[in-house]
Image (tube, rainbow, N blue to C red):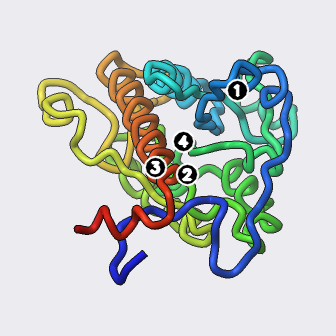
Amino acid sequence: MGKGGGCMPTKNKFPINEPAERPVSQTDITGSEAEGSKKLRIFIVFYSMYGHVERLARRMKKGVDGIEGVEGVLYMVPEILAPDVLEQMKAPPKNDDIPVISVDELMEADGFLFGFPTRYGCMAAQMKAFFDSTGKLWREQKLAGLPAGFFVSTGTQGGGQETTAWTAVTQLAHHGMLYVPIGYTFGAGMFRMDSIIGGSPYGAGTFSGDGSREPSEPELALAEHQGKYMAMTVERLAQHHSLPPDSCSTLQT
């Protein structure tokens, strides 16, 4: 790469560490790779206490899966509150069809979409605790170069649709990950003023109110768009990574 080169960094090549090998998972053995066409995987990792973030996550997966060659994989982060506390907070039970992710499983992804509710303008403690547990990956920068985005849920209109996402960017920065906001790529849907719509240039979002308000169709549509947008971004990065080393200088001319 020449000075000011434009080739994107890969997750397998860092200046301070040896390449990190990805652990072999069951999908590596029995999935599409066995058929010679392994899909790129975006892990949609979220925490949802009352189901609002989960609904966005499921719709986001639909967007990811809509791009050929890319698939979305849903994961929850571990719960840190005791069952009796959750019962007092009237939190419904978690769905059994979505597994709880481990730290090591993060290395199997080609990109991430992290979702969480706000707590005073920052991510919920459950998601922060999970990020705090990734120290061994941080030390070896095993997630560096991987693209990631955010989606959120807030209780009020001024409750952190933007701050909840941008205060989370520090987690990506320390891991060397690439933050991928959606900007205004959703077009006219992000400029509507005739109804309350969550989301921002930082990522999709919804308003939960007192918990009774469910994500609206415009909010779910934005989540689906973010899934597609991230899938296309991951796909483009993969195409750059597959170029021969001397092609970087060619791309600059």
- Disc 1 + disc 2, Cβ < 8 Å: no
Q: Inspect the image, locate mark 3, and give the three-letter code of the amino acid beneath it.
A: Leu
Element marked by disc 2: strand
What residue is shown with label 2?
119
Residue 14 seen by the camera: yes
Element marked by disc 1: loop
Q: Inspect the image, locate mark 1, and give the three-letter code of the amino acid beneath it.
A: Ala
Give the Cα distance between marks 1 and 2: 16 Å
Q: Inspect the image, locate mark 4, and give the three-letter code of the amino acid beneath it.
A: Leu
Residue 215 locus on image (x, y percent): 42, 22
Please identify, in this view, whether the residue under mark 1 or under mark 3 is nearer the observer: 3
Quadrant including the N terminus: bottom left
Q: Residues within 10 Å of mark 2 (few under 14, many from 20)?
A: some
Q: Is residue 140 left or right of residue 181?
A: right
Residue 213 locus on image (x, y percent): 43, 21
Residue 87 seen by the camera: no
Give the Cα distance between marks 2 and 3: 33 Å
Q: Is residue 39 left or right of residue 77?
A: left
Please identify, in this view, whether the residue under mark 4 or under mark 2 is nearer the observer: 4
What residue is shown with label 1?
91
Q: Residues within 10 Å of mark 1 (few under 14, many from 20)?
A: some
What residue is shown with label 4?
113
